[in-house]
Amino acid sequence: MRYAMAIDTKKCVGCSDCVVACQTENNVPHGYCRDWVVEVMDGTYPNLEMEIRSERCNHCDNSPCVRCCPTGASHYADGGIIKVKPHKCIGCGACIQSCPYDARYSHPDGYVDKCTFCKHRVDKGEDPSCVSVCPTNCMYFGDLDDPASDVSKALRNRKYKALAPEAGTKPQIFYLI
Amino acid sequence: MREEIFISGRNIPNIDPHLNIWHWQIPVYLFLGGLAAGILFFAALYTILGKEKQMPTTVKWATFLVPVALVLGLFALFLDLKHKLYFWQLYTTVRFESPMSWGAWVLMIITPLSMIWCATYIKELIPKWDWKFEFLNKFEKFAIANRKPMAWALLILSVILGIYTGILLSAFNARPLWNTSILGPLFLVSGLSTGAAAIMWMSKDHFERTLMSKIDLMLIMIELFFITHLFMGFLASSAVQIQAVGLFLGGQFTVSFWVFVVILGLVFPAVLEIMKLRGYKIPVAIPAFLILFGGLMFRFIMVEAGQITRYLY
Amino acid sequence: MKTRRDFIKISALGTAGAAVATSAFSTVKAGSLFDWGEKTPLDDSEFIRTATYCEVCFWKCAGWTYSTSKGDIVKILGNEDDPHCNGRLCPRGTGGVGMFTDKDRLRNPLIRVRKEDGKSVFRDASWDEALDLIAKKFKEIAGKHGPESIALFNHGSSGKHFGHLLKAFGSSNITAPSYAQCRGPREVGFVATYGAGVGSPEPTDIRDTECMVLIGSHLGENMHNGQVQEMSEAIDKGATIITVDPRYSTAASKSKFWLPIKPSTDLALLLAWIHVIIYEELYDKEYVKKYTYGFDKLKKHVKNMTPEWAYGITTIKPDIIRKTAREMGDASPAVIVHPGRHVTWYGDDTQRSRAIAILNGLLGSWGRRGGFYLKESIKIPKYPTPKYPKPKWSWKDALDGKYPLAGLSVANGFIDATIPSEENKYQLHAWIVSGTNLPLTMPDKDTLNEAMNALDFMVVVDTMPMEITGYADVVLPECTYLERYDDIRSAPHREPNIALRSPAVKPKYDSKPAWWMAKELGNKLGLEKYFPWNDFEEVISYQLEELGTSLDEMKVIGVKKFDREYGGLYMGDGEDFEFNTNTGKIELFSTELAALGFDPMPKYTEHPEPPSGYYRLIYGRAPMHTFSRTANNQNLVDLMGENNLWVNPKVANIWELTNGQEVWLENQDGAVSKFPIKVRITERIRWDSIYMVHGFGHSNRKLSNAFGKGVNDSELITTVMVDPIMGGTGMRGNFVTFLTEDPGKEIES
């Protein structure tokens, strides 16, 4: 099993519902977020091009954050989801330094926090909160090992890319382009 | 024109606009670790070489700084932890891939060992010292008898500690400015150099001072050589690293790096020491202080600047 | 001379401002020091789920409020059965929690008192006191000037309750800025063409369209949920989107064709498209023949309005105009030339909307799959109350023949009618303002201030200390939509449907639902017979039973769909269809406009252009906010806390502006922004315009998240081009320049 996400940059309008839904679902404190939206625009008026991306932890296959954690608080959970055990985390910040996506932050309670792919929902067979609320239906979640999953289907039919693949972490969030 | 912006989220304390999760504690920790490693290295080296008599400051007196530096360093690290009550989790597991874990364990071993080392010399420092308990007296005798093996252990551990202070940073691929394997040797040499400077400053013996001064001079040369290689390596590397090293080549850290680290922390003290070796009267405190100051600045700047460098955005 | 209605910051007296720490509720399982468990959010089944529909914008998506037994609201999710949202709320709906938790909410009624030094302050009051005062004043004013002199400005659900109260009291002067400041012109334009307005939600069949044309409409940034969802579906299906906008909007970035038009020239483009579609015979011939009136007149009318003619005006190249017209023709009838929503731009907006309506008529999209579907809604039975008294006059009389086609009341007309003058026979003397923040909503602030100064009495009902509350004599704190019942939502859609709003938790502080205020006020005004119920729940319960369901059922399902009663979703092939116009046909030539002396077919007129050194002020929406009402919502402030000023790099270069630099703005009439705004240098805006998101620049310090954040575009809109047909306030004819030094404007609060 290998959970992953595909996000359609052609459909995303950057409304940021994913961000606020994550905050309410996971009780993320105000001023913090586990996902965010980036807009990249290229060109000169009026020849312009724009890509909008909802970003979060890439739940990398080769995760530097898990590798550098001195206590094992950061770990691979089922399906390759990267999670943090708050009660093992000492808040040293090494994993934050190690992430090329800057997807982790120090929770005001001290431990390091990040996207969990809403594991508590996924375990029940639901989509992560961000995916389930997206008004444009631009996010696909599922098991890459299952050819019938939403994410497998999306990746089969479209061109896609990952962010900063050169960092070598084998990211598992794919952007349909 | 290319415009890349966060349109929502991402205004997270200490993460945006750029990473600033490690503050003064980590560079201080790295500096004190390097300093302790340097002093211990020379103490162990000259013990093994049987030069206790000629090099009393190196082998004995300077080592009393080590437990203090290590404890202060560990305390600084503790202050950096955001989930402090759980610090003991560091010692529930050994994680070979994690430099932080390496450091915690090396310090766990080297700190008591350095204390034992000092304990074997405490009666030479304070003749009236009394251990009060008989078993401590017995232990002292045992330790004194085993100084050589202890020195071997310290020699190895101090090199590991010294390199570790660099690897802690260089192991982070995500921070292009840190991600160079030369940082380990560089920080080791820098640590040895600060250790030598401290010994030189404390020593009242002319032979010892001059020897340490020469060693220091050599270490500074090696350091400058490594720094040159650091830049050569970066400039011949990938785009993110070329961009990262730009912070020192015209970027916002250019002045602080070249002035405080390279000129005031390395070149100027080296010139002073050469002049001193040639017979000019220069108080030892000046080059020693500059080297220590330069070493501290180097760590501050590397930690601060490295966090600015990133892959995306 | 009347004393100035000086602005008051809320609770200068009293203790209502005492901070109450927001309860730190826990939705995670707590762990002790030695707890090895993980922090996992609670399961949905551990919360209480309550049906509601959203009030953060007026798309009114139905959803579920999840709350704890302690009375904390945790999250809001969409109702899967709701055609407005299909189970997916937009960021504002999801962030609606922030309306409930906002620490700056109004907590108790406030009454304006005048201190000895002549300055006004608010004092805390009990509900009884506040309502008694309002009843006394209303009776006084009605005695002197008649009940008709009391008006209601409203936006949203609570206005309905006060509307009922006012009508019972004898006034039909009820208005909302959503008409003449927003979508009025398109309604009139479509009524003049099809005999039917567009309404909300728009019956655009976007999910099945093959080609959608957006004229300055920025779907995606304007987060009208259902439309955005369908646009995404259309993108998936490969539909062509054509966006006309001087700004590279989000929608433009999704479009096959982006036409970066010179602002204010849209009508020329529309006419050129009509020309191409007629002269290249791209129109739906059968449809035009069977259903439209005035084709030949139109053909003659647009004869010279060629793409080459339009090129000189719009700067859009003729071949692009032809190419896009052919795209539309190819897709016909599955094509939508979108009517837009906020269309009060240049004062000829009804005519521009007419051109859009005509274009759709030629392409045969009205009543066709992939065009405009035939919407249907269900009528909510009225709870039996006595007939309202007949008012002696209404806003129509006050307009005195102006704006003859205003289908709904014109808010700016109400403001004009409040200012005393020789000619003003129908003066308004008191206002209730409910759920609309006029200072950030209405253009031409001086006239608004003049009107408010002339008022004898003003009641403001709101959940938040919006700027308008500072001008009130009495402020009534309303509870949020999550804490109250409101009318059943019945909006037109593909399938008729209803949605329930019920309270998830008890009202916070001493706030109350609007129905309660209206009823209590009614009792004090001797209008008990209009409120023959104890709780609004009874009204809803009655109505639901009449509709064949029940409150209990609706609490479980939230949304109920009904079968269509009036035929199919689309017109059948060759089906006879009578349009509600004078001719019974789609009027390409409007007989109604002709009879009233207006142009029966749209003509392009030139509009003022920015003087040298000035740039056209274009404002719009961000998907995370609804006008000014969400600017203090912590959940949404987290997403976007202030607006930025979009400046083309060429312009930035001339003015030596840098990214993130703060500038103040001054318009052509010398109006200066209160606060600075941060510059965002971007290629996405034309060099003759600047752009900002509407709804920021709040000046009430009590809005602790929103105060001083960004610029309020409304204060820079002092030149208004009024639409003579329906009174809409065209607001895109304002030009601003940059002030890089602090002009030192006084902040009134």
Image: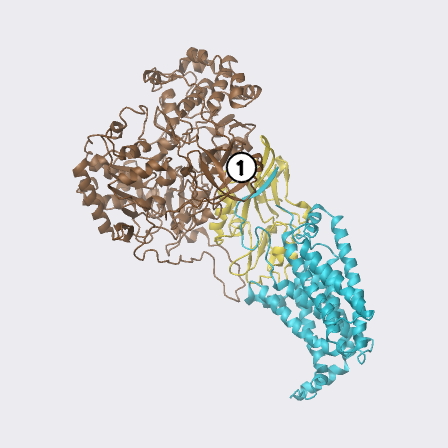
- What secondary structure is found at the residue carrying circle 1? strand
Q: Is residue B223 above or below residue A56?
A: below
Give the camera-side residue of C705 and C192: C705
- Total numbered circles: 1
* Residue C628 image point, x, y percent: 41, 42
Side of C244 relative to C552 (left or right): right
Side of C480 relative to C225 (left or right): left
Q: Chain of mark 1?
A: C
Chain C tint in image: brown
Quadrant of res B90:
bottom right
Give the camera-side residue of B149 and C352: C352
* Residue C421 image point, x, y percent: 25, 32
Give the camera-side residue of C149 and C537: C149
* Residue, disc 1: C647
Residue at (48% x, 38% y) in the render? C692
Q: Quadrant of the N terminus of chain B?
A: top right
Q: Is residue B44 above or below residue C193?
A: below
Q: Quadrant of the C terminus of chain B?
A: top right
Side of C139 relative to C289 (left or right): left
Dot 1 crowding, Cα within 10 Å, few <14, some 14–19, many 20+: many
Output the letter for the chain in cyan. Answer: B
* Residue C645 image point, x, y percent: 50, 39
Task: Examine the rendering and report whether any part of residue C533 can be seen.
Answer: no
* Residue B25 image point, x, y percent: 61, 64
Quadrant of res B141:
bottom right
| Callout 1 amino acid | Val
